[in-house]
Amino acid sequence: MSTIGYGLEGKIVVVTGGSRGIGLELAKRLLLEKAKVVICGRKKENLEAAAAALGNSADLLAVTAHIAKEEDVNALFDQVLKRFPTVDVLINNVGMNLVTASTAETDVALWQKIIDTNLTGTFICSRKAAAIMKANKKGAIVNISSIAGRKASPGMGIYGIAKAGVEMMTKVLAAELAQYGIRVNAVAPAMVRTEFSRPFWSNDDIRALVVRGIPLGRIAEPEEVVHPALFLASDAAGFITGQTIVVDGGATAI
């Protein structure tokens, strides 16, 4: 892992979906930056494994929470404030895609599950974090979106709709929260080599098809999403809000 610094020492950062993939890489980098890190996830065993991998640091708090459930989010932030004095940064990283052949033929229950996890959960967490940040007159929220929210992708229709909503939410919250010194931005990656996307990149035919549409000729590694996210969380991005950085190897440029 590179030694780029973001000036996040001492910052209290909540990372949703922090037990694996991009979220876990974010937590690793943040701890190297000497930030205080909170990770959450739905499965206790995954969180325990992640905490062990991160060294069970005194600067780390792992909380079991389903971010689409308001009571879980309230409990999450209650635990954060019992351990740390405030919240400086929220990184909304949770994402879930259940492949659907046709959005128009998807049943409402599956639609709701995908929308709740990707969009509603981001809203609930952002609302809770914003209430804390308002008192401080500062803060940063970074949403992990996807280029699936910008172009229709086979089997990812509802996921893409949810991520499109995340990008509009990013703009709306940025406009509404700017008066409180709170910045809201997003990162939209193409396919990233994580467990989340393994069904796609582990299939040679699918991976080849995806890579053909990426000018740089490969899929992204988790760290390549981490760096833009931490830049947006840092004071170096102090005059940036309401924006989405696209990290796609040029896929949306062609």
Image (cartoon, rainbow, N blue to C red):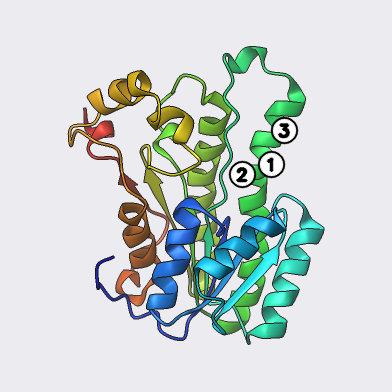
Callout 2: SS: helix
> In this picture, is 200 found above or below 146?
above
> What's the mark number on residue 112?
3
Q: Residue furthest left?
A: 216
Give the residue drawn at x 70%, y 71%.
77
**Residue 142 shown left or right of residue 65 in the figure:** left
Question: Amino acid type of disc 3?
Answer: Gln
> What's the mark number on residue 119?
2
Image location (x, y in percent) of residue 116: 69, 41
**Residue denoted by label 1:** 116
Question: Amino acid type of disc 1?
Answer: Asp
Question: Amino acid type of disc 2?
Answer: Leu
**Dot 3 alpha-carbon crowd within 10 angstroms: few under 14, some 14 to 19, many 20 or more:** few
Callout 3: SS: helix
C-alpha distance separating marks 3 and 1: 6 Å
Give the residue drawn at x 38%, y 53%.
243
In the rendered image, is residue 211 in sight?
A: yes
C-alpha distance separating marks 2 and 1: 6 Å
C-alpha distance separating marks 2 and 3: 10 Å
Quadrant in the picture for the N terminus: bottom left
State yes or no: discs 2 and 1 in contact (Cβ < 8 Å).
yes
Give the residue drawn at x 24%, y 31%.
214
Image location (x, y in percent) of residue 221: 32, 48
> In this picture, is 160 found above or below 55?
above
